[in-house]
């Protein structure tokens, strides 16, 4: 498993057991912990292994963070806000964040076994 950086790895690993009830939720936590600013906002919306995406003020987020949040929400709740074109757009996602989202898809499908 690749991480965006050492901080991402440390934060994610500290929350694995708390959010491992569902593969989708675990994958969303993997994505959200990759962005420090986004995680600081979202960690207060995570309780009992669930994520409340609706409490976030989306208008305050820069484009990449908004897209990262939507990717996490899509994977967690099995929705489709983002298209493959959005995911592949270099102006929306950095190469590193694209890699994080692809790894999250593995987590969503195969669970903790990919870790």
Image (cartoon, rainbow, N blue to C red):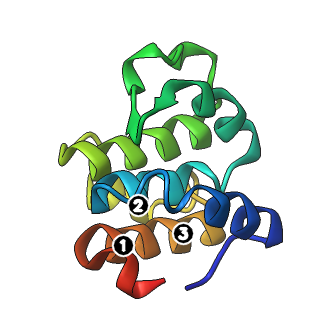
- From mark 3 to mark 1, how far is it between C-alphas? 11 Å
- Point out residue 109 in the picture as x, y percentages from the top left corner: 23, 73
- From mark 2 to mark 1, how far is it between C-alphas? 5 Å
Q: Is residue 59 above or below residue 80?
A: above
Q: Please give left or right for residue 28 compared with residue 22 in the image.
A: right
* Sequence-wise first label, 2 or 3: 2
* Sequence-wise first label, 2 or 1: 2
Q: Please report the residue visible at 39 percent of the width from the left and 26 percent of the height from the top.
A: 52
For the residue pair 62 and 100, the one nearer the viewer reads as: 100
- Point out residue 102 in the picture as x, y percentages from the top left corner: 42, 73
For the residue pair 96 and 21, the one nearer the viewer reads as: 21
Q: Please report the residue visible at 60 percent of the width from the left and 39 percent of the height from the top.
A: 65
Q: Which residue is mark 3?
A: 100
Q: Which residue is mark 1?
A: 107
Q: Which residue is mark 2?
A: 27
Whether tag 2 and tag 3 are in contact, CB under 8 A, the answer is no
Give the mark toward the camera: 3 or 1.
1
Q: Please report the residue visible at 54 percent of the width from the left and 69 percent of the height from the top.
A: 100
């Amino acid at each position: 498993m690749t991480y965006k950086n050492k901080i991402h790895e440390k934060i994610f690993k500290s929350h694995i057991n708390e959010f491992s009830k569902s593969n989708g939720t675990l994958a969303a936590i993997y994505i959200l912990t990759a962005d420090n600013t986004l995680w600081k906002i979202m960690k207060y919306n995570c309780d009992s292994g669930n994520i409340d995406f609706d409490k976030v003020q989306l208008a305050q987020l820069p484009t990449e963070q908004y897209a990262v949040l939507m990717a996490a929400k899509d994977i967690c709740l099995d929705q489709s806000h983002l298209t493959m074109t959005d995911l592949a757009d270099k102006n929306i996602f950095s190469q590193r964040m694209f890699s994080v989202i692809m790894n999250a898809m593995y987590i969503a499908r195969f669970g903790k076994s990919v870790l």
